Every structure is written in C-alpha cells, then in structure tokens.
C-alpha cells in the first residue's frame, strides 16, 4: 500500500464535540457483531470523548463524489489503532472553507436525531447506525494544513439505498421507510435522504446523509422545500411505511424534477414547464374528486346490498332500499324508527355516528361495514375539498 512519506501524512483530530462513545463496527469484513464494545446510541465515532487519534492514508482516492474525494487509511494511534478509516477531502477551493465542514456536521447531527427516533419506534427489527465524521487537520505531506473529515470505514458491500432526488434502489424498503419517517416526524419540514452505507445481518451503518430543509440549512445537497416535495412525489411506500404517517397533499404528488441515482448538488433537472404543471394540477384535482366519489358510492352500494341480504328483508323492503328514505311509505319508516330508536345510531355501534346517505335506506342493521367505509370516505373527500379550495 502506497504511503506519503515523509512521507506519511499524519493527521491529528480536534476534540470530539460529543461525550459518549457509540457503536463501532469490527475492523474485519464479515465479522461485524450486533453489540460491539463501547456501543450505545446511533453514532459510530473515531474515538471516545477527548480521545486522541492519528491515522495515515493512501495517496490516491478509492472513491469520488461530486465535490469530495475519499481515501483509505489506518489508525496508528488511539483506541481504534490498527483499524481502517476513511478520509474525505473536499476538492480544490473548498479545503479552507469552514462552512462546508459545519454543514456536513449539522446534517449528520440532524440525521442522527431521526435515526434514533426510528430505532426507538421499532419500525424494523434491524437498528440503524450512522458514522459521525470529525474535522481533523493534516500535519504532514500533501495534506499538511488542510482540513479533512475522518470516520471509521464501512466494510463489505456498499449500497446506495436512495438519492436526494427520490431515486430508490430495489429492495430497500427499510431505508425508504426511514426517509418517509423523517418527513412525518418533522411535520414535512425536513427529509432525510441520500441514504448509503453497509447492510449487515443485524443492522445498517450509514454515512454521508443529506437533509432537505425548508430554508436550505444543510449545504449544497439540501434542495430545500422543492427537494422535500420532489422526493415524496417519487416515493412509493413499502411494507415498513406506516399508513398513518404524514403524506403530501394531492397537487404536491406531481414531481418537480427527475429522480436520479447520484447525489444532486444545487438543483435538479425540471420535468415540466410552468404551463404543463398548472395543467397537471387541474387534472389531479379532477381525478381525485372522481376517484373518491367512485369509491364511496361503491361502498354505499355494497353496504345496501349486504343489509338487504343479511337481514332477510322482504321484497318490499328490498325495493325500498333502492329509494331515498323520503320515498318510503310512512308505515315502513315508522317500523324502522321503532327498531332503531336512536334515529341515526347503530345499536351495535352506539359510540359512533352512522351516516345514512341519499340512495341508501337501512333498518336497524348492525351496519359495521357501512360505518367503517362511508364516513371514512366522506372524511377523505372533505380533506381533498379543503385542499383544492372547495
């Protein structure tokens, strides 16, 4: 392995910003365990609090991103002595600008908050961990005086689970759920994405996450509110996404730009012109209203049919079931009122309100399916109407 000599670029870290040593993976591929020593929380760090470490790195990068190069290295002093690590160096023009490092650190901290909550909720059985980089300073060779980011190395196959524009690799339901979870937990104000790292038998270890925020607080890969909306427009819920999690309004399900596999810096490539987008929004409003009406009308028809068949109504009652309640003979309405003295309340479901819609007439039926179907659909319809200003 080539080294810079005098050769060896030795780097020493600044004091860690946090005070607890978190999970640290094994240094040998394939031997990662579920609970390595000194593990707690979600962060994987170079060393415990105030622990001095030094490392040496290859002279050629083994990986490269849009604005950083990545070098392999080895700790030769500190608690991880002999283990492998990586150095992430910003490309020309960035090495002295503090804001690039600050934005990286802030994004990792915010990502850690979402990951910790995700683990606590038990959304999936495998816990998720996150490499926490530290800002070190080079003390020799080519990188003398340069600021760099150093973190433990992720072994085994490296996965790109999703991107910051909404692209998702197949069979990555856990990471898609994590991104959706961050959107839900933040009330739509943030979104954790561009998830990548190692997937092992007992857990995941991630690195280099991206946070989208309304005010673009987390650097050039933070695509702002457009990034949040675009990711969720491309997002397809998988088996780990909770149906009760927050989702965008109907018109925001039209993506703004293409979902690409790599990390997008600055802004994405727009999919539609303003005129096309306005036309699509009008079409979406129309389609949503039609679909909801079709859905609740189908449930209402099925409920009326089940009520007639399930309660042994005579032919006259079946005929009445196809008419508005006002058209039913008075005697028959009174019979229904005596059977169901609470008027609009199901005897078996007194704690809930059962709606009787035009075109559906029910006697004292335990109309559970009607109750669970129609009011739910009416609630959805009201929600959509409020979204489109009707």
Image (spheres, rainbow, N blue to C red):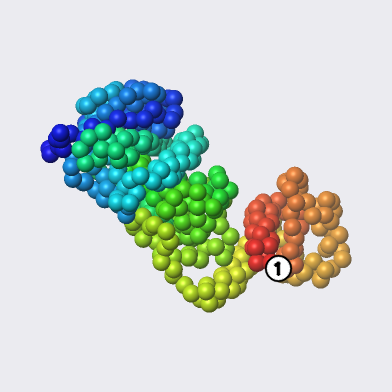
Residue 201 location (% of width, % of height): 31, 36
Asked whether residue 104 is in view, the answer is no
Residue 307 location (% of width, % of height): 68, 59
Asked whether residue 186 is in view, the answer is yes
- Relative horizontal placement of residue 234, taking residue 294 as reference (left or right): left
In this rendering, the answer to whether 301 lies above or below 340 is below
Among the 4 quarters of the image, the one containing residue 76: top left
- Relative horizontal placement of residue 232, taking residue 66 as reference (left or right): right
Among the 4 quarters of the image, the one containing residue 306: bottom right
Please state which of residues 49 and 343 is positioned toward the viewer in this rendering: 49
Residue at 33% in and 40% down: 147
Q: Quadrant of the C terminus?
A: bottom right
In this rendering, the answer to whether 74 lies above or below 208 is above
Please state which of residues 39 and 45 is positioned toward the viewer in this rendering: 45
In this rendering, the answer to whether 111 lies above or below 357 is above
Q: Quadrant of the N terminus?
A: top left
Q: Which residue is mark 1?
A: 390
SS under mark 1: loop
């Amino acid at each position: 392995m080539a080294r810079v000599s005098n050769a060896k670029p030795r780097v020493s870290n600044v004091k860690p910003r946090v005070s607890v040593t978190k999970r640290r993976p094994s240094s040998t591929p394939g031997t990662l365990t579920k609970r390595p020593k000194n593990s707690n929380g979600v962060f994987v760090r170079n060393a415990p609090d105030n622990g001095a470490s030094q490392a040496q790195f290859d002279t050629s990068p083994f990986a490269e991103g849009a604005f950083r190069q990545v070098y392999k290295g080895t700790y030769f002093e500190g608690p991880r002595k002999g283990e492998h690590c990586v150095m992430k160096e910003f490309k020309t023009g960035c090495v002295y600008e503090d804001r690039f490092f600050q934005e990286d650190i802030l994004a990792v901290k915010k990502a850690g908050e979402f990951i910790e909550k995700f683990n606590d909720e038990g959304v999936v059985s495998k816990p998720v961990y996150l490499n926490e980089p530290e800002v070190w300073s080079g003390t020799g060779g080519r990188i003398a005086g340069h600021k760099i980011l150093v973190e433990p190395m992720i072994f085994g196959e490296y996965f790109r689970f999703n991107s910051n524009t909404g692209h998702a690799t197949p069979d990555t339901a856990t990471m898609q759920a994590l991104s959706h979870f961050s959107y839900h937990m933040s009330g739509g104000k943030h979104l954790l994405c561009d998830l990548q790292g190692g997937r092992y038998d007992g857990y995941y270890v991630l690195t280099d996450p991206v946070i989208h925020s309304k005010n673009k607080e987390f650097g050039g890969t933070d695509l702002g509110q457009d990034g949040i909306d675009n990711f969720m427009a491309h997002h397809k819920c998988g088996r780990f996404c909770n149906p009760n999690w927050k989702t965008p309004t109907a018109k925001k399900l039209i993506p703004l730009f293409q979902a690409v596999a790599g990390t997008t810096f600055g802004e994405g490539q727009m999919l539609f012109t303003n005129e096309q987008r306005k036309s699509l929004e009008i079409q979406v409003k129309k389609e949503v209203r039609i679909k909801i009406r079709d859905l609740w009308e189908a449930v209402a028809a099925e409920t009326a049919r089940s009520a007639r068949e399930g309660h042994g109504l005579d032919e006259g009652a079946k005929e009445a079931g196809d008419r508005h309640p006002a058209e039913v003979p008075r005697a028959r309405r009174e019979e229904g009122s005596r059977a169901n003295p609470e008027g609009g309340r199901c005897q078996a479901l007194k704690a809930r309100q059962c709606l009787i819609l035009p075109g559906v007439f029910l006697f004292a039926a335990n109309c559970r399916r009607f109750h669970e179907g129609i009011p739910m659909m009416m609630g959805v319809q009201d929600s959509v109407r409020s979204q489109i200003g009707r």
